[in-house]
Amino acid sequence: MNSEHILSESLEDYLEAILELQTMNTVARSKDIAARLNIKCGSVTGTLKKLADRKLINYEPYGYITLTDKGDKIAKEVTTRHNVFKHFLFKHVQLDEDTAEQTACRMEHAMNHKNFMKFKAFVTKLDA
């Protein structure tokens, strides 16, 4: 991830959840985000306001939520990181799928963009 848009793990998780919901349903709703992240609906509102203030989502209370172009780009980067880590852990480390999923969720936030690109190239070579 580029230093220009460093976000907390929590904010990245929200963007990732919104992308997933938006892909499935065209838009996301607060209650769907809460269910996806396994948190209470009341906790979602404050975070959505933060994301809207950073121009990462389009949000009006009681309305639908969509990613802005900037939010979409970040969400796709986080999703790509997640998928690469999960693939590596499942296929090459041979963790069970649930453990690979949970571990990838933590790893996707930990590595800077430059090192992630090197890791991704390494995994691509392993797969060749």
Image: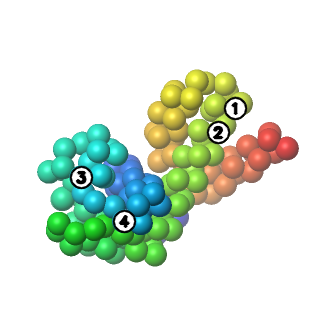
C-alpha gap between disc 4 and disc 3: 12 Å
- Residue 45 visible from this viewpoint: yes
Q: Are marks 1 and 2 in contact (CB under 8 Å)?
A: yes
Decide which of tag 3 and tag 2 comes sooner along the chain: 3
Image mark for residue 30: none
| Residue type (three-letter) at the residue carrying disc 3 | Lys
Disc 1 is placed on an element classified as helix
Decide which of tag 1 and tag 3 comes sooner along the chain: 3
Where 65 falls versus 98 (above or below)? below
Q: To which residue does mark 3 refer?
A: 31
C-alpha gap between disc 4 and disc 2: 27 Å
Position of residue 102 in the picture relative to residue 88 (left or right)? left
Image mark for residue 91: 1
Q: Farthest left residue?
A: 42
- Residue 52 visible from this viewpoint: no
Q: Are marks 1 and 3 in contact (CB under 8 Å)?
A: no
Q: To which residue does mark 2 refer?
A: 87
Q: Residues within 10 Å of mark 1 (few under 14, many from 20)?
A: some
